[in-house]
Image (cartoon, rainbow, N blue to C red):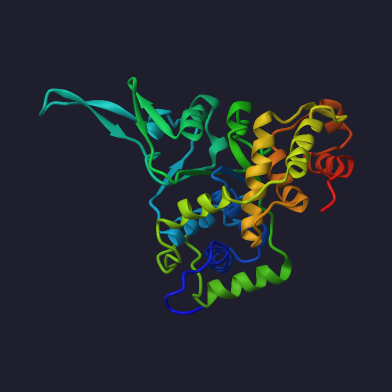
Amino acid sequence: MSENEQPSHHDQARRIETALNEVLVGQPRVVRQILVALVAGGHVLLEGVPGLGKTLLVRSLARALGLPFGRVQFTPDLMPTDITGHTLYDASTERFRVRKGPVFTNMLLADEINRAPAKTQAALLEVMQERQVTIEGQAFALTEPFMVMATQNPIDQEGTYPLPEAELDRFLFKVLIDYPDDRDEQELTRLVLDGAIGSNLDVAGLEAVLDTDAVPELRAERDRILVDDAVLDYAVRLARTTRDLAGVERGASPRASIALVQAGRAHALLEGRSFVTPDDIKAVAAPVLRHRMQLSADAEIEGQTSETVLERLLETVDAPRQ
């Protein structure tokens, strides 16, 4: 590439992906799904046990994009106004003024979101859907791009609360992060001991790889990715079939159909294509659908999981020929 030649949008996305993979060793699938969600314009719920780098990933993404970053540590005593902000009386002016909360940023890390009760979690509903915050009847728009990345520990751990259905549906993806394999864990340990990467969430050494206009440009390019009617029909059939699958008590909403297509477009962009294929839809089906299905009690007793149901779904619904 010449000095004056601008990198393609595909190349820009890959530069971010490379930078994140150097920080989050052994989790390329997770990194790819986070980037797909970023380009698709959605929010992400990251689930995994402590110590797997969930917080590090979010901080690194904000750093790599040169975007402002905010963090809220969710605890049982956290109040909704601790997230959104509140009004207070200013004695010097004898007036009430608004103190904005940490949600007023570009990338918000909602750390251990399921440590707080539903009332506090609900403070994010308006923020995630409408990109605005209402304080004492006054609406404040958030600055784009805005993305919530929430982390949670597995729901069967002590001291956690299930997320409300309405909030779950506002997350584009639910991404599962698991332990790295033996080789990657050895490499991670070696890099930390050698000082190549930090072990205390310090991302100061990570340079911004793109400017702040990159995300809007990537999203504009996403909208130009072509979606054939047959591929769109396939995405809708996947979402609709979840409502009739044996063992599923509650299937995915129409929001899931939209999410599958938008995420499929973003995936196609990262793959360097100008059109969406059925494989793009399949690649994003699990993170789009796994948190939008509620299994029946009988299915859970039988040992079924969202993952096994999703496997059955992809086998059941015929994909169009490419």
Residue at point 77% right, 53% down?
Answer: 279
In this rendered view, identify the residue nearer to me: 217 or 30: 217
Residue 177 position within the rendered picture, expressed as x and y whole percent measured from the top left: 66, 52
Residue 121 position within the rendered picture, expressed as x and y whole percent measured from the top left: 51, 30
198 sits to left or right of 35: left
74 sits to left or right of 276: left
Residue at point 89% right, 40% down?
Answer: 316
Q: Is residue 279 above or below residue 295?
A: below
Q: Is residue 280 above or below residue 112?
A: below
Residue at point 44% right, 67% down?
Answer: 206
Image quadrant of residue 35?
bottom right
In this view of the protein, can residue 30 be seen by the observer?
no
Residue 294 position within the rendered picture, expressed as x and y whole percent measured from the top left: 75, 29
Residue at point 69% right, 45% down?
Answer: 287
In this rendered view, identify the residue nearer to me: 1 or 260: 1
In this view of the protein, can residue 168 be seen by the observer?
yes
Image quadrant of residue 77?
top left
| Residue ranking furthest to the left | 92
Residue 268 position within the rendered picture, expressed as x and y whole percent measured from the top left: 66, 55
